[in-house]
Image (spheres, rainbow, N blue to C red):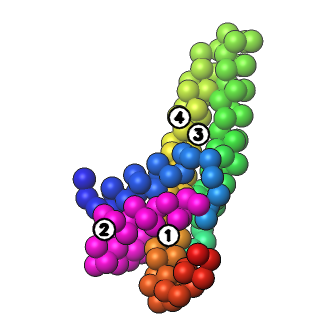
């Protein structure tokens, strides 16, 4: 597993915990600081920046993955209803294909959200590196 994939998995693990984004970034920043060199951080950040272009469908799916997948879930439910009510096998096919589409969209959104969390963490690391006195004022 490459460093890029490992960091994505770390970010996905942080997303599973119920906490604020600031807390997630803080915990992720510590993990990255202990296990990833500065040059590797820069390489991963550059790869993320080229992959995550602001705007467009990727940003929408990253920020609102459940909203984007909701129509697919609705059509899947209607397909099940049609299959049960009218004894139509095509309804079952519609239900299964839309449920698979919704799951794929949500999985993609989860990965994109983890990448955004990583980008925000790298921005935090960079701001702390350029301004080290701002972190010690709260202690």
Q: Position of residue 74 (x, y in %)?
A: 71, 34
CB-based contact (under 8 Å), mark 1 and mark 3: no
| Helix, strand or loop for disc 3 | helix
Q: How crowded is mark 3: few (under 14 residues within 10 Å), some or many (20 or more)?
A: many
Judge whether 55 appears above or below 76 on screen: below
Query: Residue 45 colored magenta?
Result: yes
Q: 18 left or right of 41? A: right
Residue 117 visible at all:
no
Predominant SS of the magenta segment? helix
Alpha carbons under labels 1 and 3: distance apart: 28 Å
Q: Mark 1 points at which residue?
A: 121
Badge number at residue 36 = 2
Q: Quadrant of residue 4?
A: bottom left
Report how far apart the C-alphas of labels 2 and 1 lie in the structure.
Answer: 13 Å
Magenta region: 23-51
Q: Mark 4 points at which residue?
A: 100
Among numbered discs 1 and 3, the one appearing first in the sequence: 3
Residue 9 on image: x %, y %: 40, 52
């Amino acid at each position: 597993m490459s460093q890029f994939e490992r960091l994505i998995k770390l970010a996905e693990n942080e997303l599973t915990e119920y906490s604020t984004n600031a807390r997630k970034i803080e915990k992720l920043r510590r993990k990255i600081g202990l296990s990833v060199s500065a040059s590797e951080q820069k390489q991963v950040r550059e790869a993320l920046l080229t992959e995550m272009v602001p705007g467009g469908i990727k940003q929408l799916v990253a920020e609102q993955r459940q909203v984007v997948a909701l129509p697919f879930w609705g059509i899947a439910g209607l397909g099940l209803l049609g299959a049960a009510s009218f004894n139509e096998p095509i309804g079952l096919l519609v239900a299964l294909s839309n449920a698979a589409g919704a799951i794929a969209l949500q999985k993609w959104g989860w990965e994109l959200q983890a990448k955004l969390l990583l980008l925000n963490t790298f921005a935090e690391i960079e701001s702390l590196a350029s301004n080290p006195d701002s972190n010690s004022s709260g202690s």
